Image: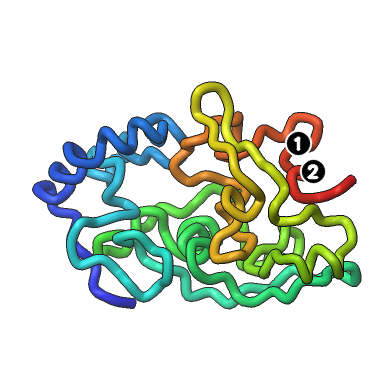
Amino acid sequence: MGTYAKPLRTIGTALLFTVAGIASAGTITGSPHDFSTQGWSGGQICVPCHTPHRANTTVADAPLWNHALTAATFTLYGSPTLNATIGQPSGGSKLCFSCHDGTVAINSFGGTTGTTFIGTGDKVGPDLRSEHPIGFTYDAALVTADGSLKATTTAVTIGAGGQTRTGTIASNLLFGGKMECASCHDVHNTFTNGGKLLKVANAGSALCITCHSK
């Protein structure tokens, strides 16, 4: 699983002062992913997930990763109407599950093994049969096969108030052309839209109909 940097106070302090401005701009401070008030975090915001040195590089798209990774085998979503091909979670979604599937403690980072696990209400997986499918390629072929998905070139604005970004389904919601956890949720709470760190507020099912033609 790679070598993790120890959450030394010197490293944590450096992260706090060099990255705090970025974290604050992204409104992670005070969000559900701000663990700085937890006794095990050392008062740090970034270190439970990221480290400036000796990061884990075994997962693609894992930015300077410092948290232990899930080793779970997931039971995948399936449906007679599903036209996409789904595989085991990888990339950014695997990072999410490294807390949210409940098999790895939230405070397992920096090479330490924690004992604080995610609450039942925020636990997702390893059984994903009742969850929105992720990890599949969302492209023109899938749009044609499905018949009720919008084209990846469809215009999409994510965020609210002064924190918005205009683009398309492909540019704002997909990662490597795939639907992932971060297609709907923003881990850093950049786009504040109520609970669950949503990129698009779901009043009137707005988030759902961003991609689905209903």
The amino acid at mark 2 is Ile
- Please tell me in which quadrant of the rendered image residue 161 appears: top right
Which quarter of the figure is the C terminus placed in?
A: top right
Q: Which residue is drawn at 19% across and 55% down?
A: 7
Could you say which quadrant of the image residue 132 lies in?
Answer: bottom right
Residue 179 seen anywhere in this rendered image of the structure? yes
Q: What element carries label 2?
A: helix
Q: Are marks 1 and 2 in contact (CB under 8 Å)?
A: yes
Q: In this view, does 16 lie above or below 27?
A: below
In three-dimensional space, the C-alpha distance between marks 1 and 2, rounded to whole angstroms, equals: 5 Å
Instruction: Please give the name of the residue rendered at 17% of the width and 37% of the height, measured from the top-left corner.
Output: 17
Residue 206 image label: 1
Q: Is residue 91 left or right of residue 75?
A: left
Among the 4 quarters of the image, the one containing residue 20: top left
Q: Residue at coordinates 67% horizontally, 69% vertically from top-left?
A: 136
Residue labelled with disc 2: 209
Foreground pick, 13 / 146 = 146
